[in-house]
Amino acid sequence: RGGRDCGRGKMVSSASAEERLTNAQELIAQGKTADAKAALKSVIDGVADKASEDEIKTREAAAQELIGVLKSESAVEELAMLSSQLRPLFAQLPKARTAKIVRTLLDSVGTLNGPFELQVKLCKDTIAWCREEKRTFLRQRVEGKLAALYLSNKQYSDSLVIVNELLREVKRLDDKAHLLEIQIVESRIYHALRNLPKARAALTSARTTANAIYVPPSLQAEIDMQAGIVSAEEKDYKTAYSYFFEAFEGLMALDDPRAVLNLKYMLLCKIMTQNAEDVASIVSGKIALKYSGPQVEAMQAIAAAYSLRSLSDFEEALKKYKSELADDLIV
């Protein structure tokens, strides 16, 4: 009888957590995010030492909901703090499900353009925790994220140190999906350092790795974009254009903001092959109109200056679109 009572108590506890989660979801739908956050936190904080699988799944769902709410509010600092607050829950989750939540958190902070220092601290804290908990797979993923962060901040040597160590580790583990991501970052680092042979070698390695596995569309677009960049540096602008076009189509289908950069580089390739007159026809299409803005306008200005053979118009464009032209490493 005592066993039955105990089982009944667990059912009530589980139902209570599920009810609170449902209530929180209703509050989100009503726009009452402050109350929803409090309700979700109460569900997450209710982790017991011997919780049932259903209870753990309910709390995991609450964590995902809370990340979504904080992301919608652009609450970057709260998202960063949540990483450590969720660790009692992580102790009860399988490693793969923990990794999914951690990566969602990191991606959310990155998508919201959180301060560089905050993102680096979040990555380093997570890496330290992964080492303590011996979570090698997740640690390597977060280190890859940190390397990409350093690259975006032009800290090339810091990024390269991480990438070189990761390449040794990941090759040994034969994790081709992660190896591919690291090789793309490696190629981007060497391109930024103006070491074109090594950038090309890393890109070739990435494409060899990609041939052996399924590559998600977003990652395939990254490969195509990097191939376009390297080809353009080698002054093979026709080949570069075809790669940028492939990347543009792939990212456009995903509604990825990087699509406009590939459109910009497509236009640049047309100018470099003395086909500046093609720029107007490309940007007048329905697809390109969606991406109108300073990036495209900068290329239109350069194309117009080229067609008129006007040095003064060219210099004026460089001044007006400094961030889109002079500050762009590719241009």
Image (cartoon, rainbow, N blue to C red):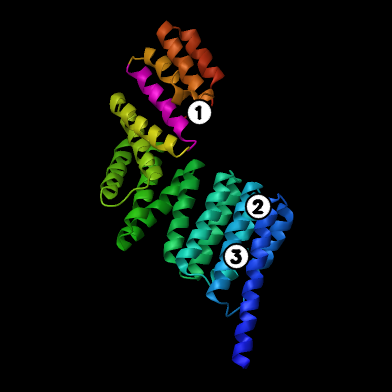
Name the residue located 32 percent from the left edge and 18 percent from the top edge: 273
Residue under circle 3? Answer: 86
Give the mark toward the camera: 2 or 1. 2
Circle on res. 327: 1
Magenta stretch, main secondary structure class = helix
Check if mark 2's residue and mark 3's residue have beta carbons within 8 Å. no
Q: Nearer the viewer, residue 84 or 30?
A: 30
Place residue 268 in its image quadrant: top left
Circle on res. 77: 2
Q: Amino acid at mark 3?
A: Leu
Q: CA distance from mark 3 to mark 1?
A: 40 Å
Would residue 262 be counted in the magenta stretch? yes
Would residue 122 be counted in the magenta stretch? no
| In the image, farthest residue toward the bottom | 1
Q: CA distance from mark 2 to mark 3?
A: 15 Å
Check if mark 3's residue and mark 1's residue have beta carbons within 8 Å. no
Q: Amino acid at mark 2?
A: Glu
Check the image and report above or below for 121 versus 289: below
